[in-house]
Amino acid sequence: MLQINVPAGDLPVLLQAKPATDNDPNSGKNRPVIKGHADEIKKYVLDRARIGKPWVLGTLTANVAREKITIIELGAGVCLVAIPNDVALDITDGQHRTRAMQELILSAERHLIGNDEFPITLVLEDSDRQCQTDFRDMAQSAPLAKSLLVSYGEFLGRDGITQNLLDRVMMFQGKTEKIKASVGVKNKLIYTTNYIAKSVSCAFVDHPDDEILEYDVETSAEALAVAFNLFFSNCSATKLIAEKKFEQLTSDEVMNFKEDYIIGLSYGLEIVGRLLNFTYDRSSNHFNEAMILRLAEIDWSRSNSVWRDNIVRLDPKPKNPAKPYKISFGTGVISTAVKIVKMELGWT
């Protein structure tokens, strides 16, 4: 096994992918191409490179028969590797990263990565079966929770604003799950950083997945912190939870809040973000306080008919007959709920 560095301009001719096709694992050396994944990687690199921010991609892994290349040992674990022009390296892991970089280097924006070099772990192996096994072994890592990705994200755009809000918004201070994918009621945590990040994007651009990299972290976080604090401190559903410090909260209070109010769930927080967007004036970077106070007056309990048959459904066989409501996770329920609230408030 060797580690080599390859100039970006050489990637299109040096590496070749052999993905499995037609439901036949033995037709390739790695998984079938995932539609759109290379475009996601390319967007990630471009979004950062265009504004001069650093970016990173994991090391690519490729294989080649030992006899097809020349290795010149220099000592101390350092060597030169000569690869003939008619030899291509088969990608074992990293076909989508490779495709993204190949497309970039052949595009009009090649100057953004043209001077970079990419590390490749080169496995001296020509057996298709062993390459498939190597790919399987490398794919065993556990996925990271999105909350941790936000917490570890660059202090930029949505992630930076979210990290900033954790210290500025009463409802989030000490009450947010920053590592795991979901909250633990027994731990008295209410939201995850991922829930908050989606609401942040919605508040500024009405789309939960937009990274809003063009938004200044400090000024945007300050404006949204004011809006969130105004909302949470005036909403009857959240006022008690928001004003209490984490140490003062009980597990029962948090559990009842999440069971009784949609605003205690990720969907509810996203709805708040989308409605805050309607109050936002980007030219002045200001959320309309009078409109926020009207939002705070809404009945956010699951029993409110406003949420019925969009985000809340009646459970025909509830465990607790006093609370016959269950959350609907169907497509479009959030948009429908937002539209109904806007009509109720006369925001058309």
Image (cartoon, rainbow, N blue to C red):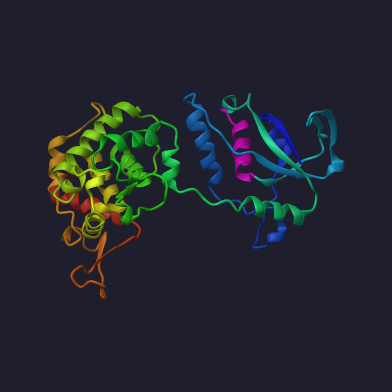
What type of secondary structure mainly makes up the magenta span? helix
> Is residue 266 highlighted in magenta?
no
Q: Residue furthest front?
A: 247
Residue shown at the point (23%, 26%) measured from the top left: 284
Residue 64, can we see it?
yes
Q: Is residue 99 left or right of residue 65?
A: left
Q: Is residue 166 left or right of residue 110?
A: left
Report x, y in % for residue 190.
29, 50
Viewer-closest of 114 and 188: 188
Residue 346, can we see it?
no
Q: Quadrant of residue 211?
A: top left
Q: Quadrant of the N terminus?
A: top right
Report x, y in % for residue 159.
39, 36
In the rendered image, the vertical position of residue 260 relative to residue 240, given as above or below: below
Report x, y in % for residue 219.
29, 26
Q: What stretch of residues is rendered in magenta?
A: 94-109
Report x, y in % for residue 322.
18, 70
Residue shown at the point (68%, 29%) measured from the top left: 9
In the rendered image, the vertical position of residue 301 relative to residue 75, given as above or below: below
> Is residue 107 highlighted in magenta?
yes
